[in-house]
Image (cartoon, grey):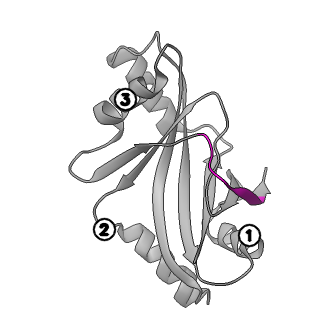
Amino acid sequence: MSRINLRVWLIIPDAEAATVKNTLIRRMGYGDTLADVKKERLFSIDVDSGNPQELAKAFAKELVNENKESYRAYFDGIKFEAGYVPVKVALKIEDGEAISIMYRLRNRLGFQNVRGVEKATVWKLYLKGENPESAAKEIAEGLLINPNKDSYEILGKESSVRVVAAMK
């Protein structure tokens, strides 16, 4: 079993990320610590066969709007650039959208090798200070998640990965 991770981000202004940034600075007191906030969608697609590069490109055609989004695909891991703390927010309850994507890939598009799909949001928190991970944890628990339905994870910068596809 292999996992293809698609990181998808807007190349146009992101109103939701701007709203989160403004809320954190103006209402929650993070003006001295927070430099910026950006957001990505993360699709983790488990497959049991096939060429990862070709599959990543095919999945991106279905999941990425090329008019306003860009993406990078990773095989069996994920890597993040330096300069921010990546916070992954996902549903801890059943995710109907991820299930729908899996059925669309398998049944409508014929990718019978797709075994599972997970969807999450990665908040990229550009933080200053001594302990950015601690501030990221406070921000996640204070604003980014609903503890009744969401879970979060502060991700490391990289694991053993290889980029299989990218679109700028």
Residue 127's place in the image compared with 101, above or below, is: above
In the image, what residue occupies the spot 61% across and 86% down?
A: 111
Residue 162 located left or right of residue 36: right
**Residue that badge 2 annotates:** 94
Q: Amino acid at mark 2?
A: Glu
Q: Is residue 77 above or below residue 99?
A: above
User: Whole-percent x and y of residue 158?
Assistant: 63, 45
Q: Secondary structure at mark 3?
A: helix
Rendering coords of residue 85 (x, y %): 53, 32
**Residue drawn at 43 percent across, 31 percent down:** 20
Label 1 residue SS:
helix
Give the quarter of the image for residue 100. bottom left
Range of magenta residues: 157-165
- On the image, numbered disc 1 is attached to which residue? 57
CB contact under 8 Å: marks 3 and 2: no
Residue bearing the label numbered 3: 139
Q: Residue furthest top?
A: 32
N-terminal of the pair, mark 3 or mark 1, is 1
